[in-house]
Image (cartoon, grey):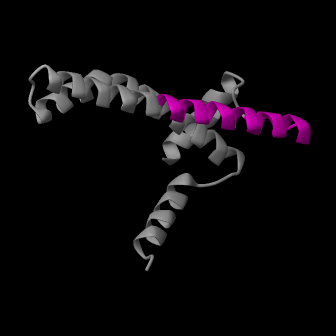
Amino acid sequence: MRNLQEFTKGYQKELNFHIKEDSYERSKVSLLTNHMLLTTEVAEIAELLRELCVTAEQKMEDGIDEVTAFRQAQEQVSVEMGKEVSDCIAYLCKFGNFFERDMEKDFYSKMDEVKNRK
């Protein structure tokens, strides 16, 4: 994760995709814009999940067994799913970088917190 954060920091600055920090107003607009863009990418994942289910159900109606139908539908959306998940990771890294977070450390800390809930 640290490597991803470091890569995205340079990549996003190079392309001028980083969250602007030169004024409150620009930061606010940039944060809100990037939040909207992230939610759009999450919605695209939802659309692929819908496509997965619809495709699997169509294949089952055509007589393909449930497991095979689901696997074929999964393969059909796999490449696009990878792209959309990657877009989400890029936006999340952007937020992590803006707030100067070590996302890898935060991730494992959060997973420990979840694991230890009662």
Q: Is the magenta stretch mostly helix, strand or loop?
A: helix
> Is residue 23 among the parts visible in the rendering?
no
Residue 112, placed above or below residue 15? below
Q: Residue at x 65, y 29 (%)?
A: 12
Q: Which of 61 and 42 is in front in this view?
A: 61
Q: Which residue is drawn at 64% across and 39% down?
A: 94
Q: Position of residue 45 (x, y in %)?
A: 45, 32
The residue stretch that appears in magenta: 19-44
Asked whether 29 falls inside the magenta stretch, the response is yes
Q: Which residue is drawn at 60% across and 35% down?
A: 38
Q: Where is residue 82 in the image (x, y as percent from the top left)?
A: 39, 29
The C terminus: image quadrant: bottom left
Q: Where is residue 112 in the image (x, y as percent from the top left)?
A: 44, 70
**89 to the left or right of 59:** right
| Quadrant of the image occupied by residue 58 | top left
Q: Position of residue 88 (x, y in %)?
A: 53, 36
Farthest residue toward the front?
Answer: 61
Q: Residue at x 55, y 60 (%)?
A: 106
Asked whether 60 falls inside the magenta stretch, the response is no
Q: Which of 2 and 87 is in front in this view?
A: 87
Residue 77, placed above or below residue 67? above
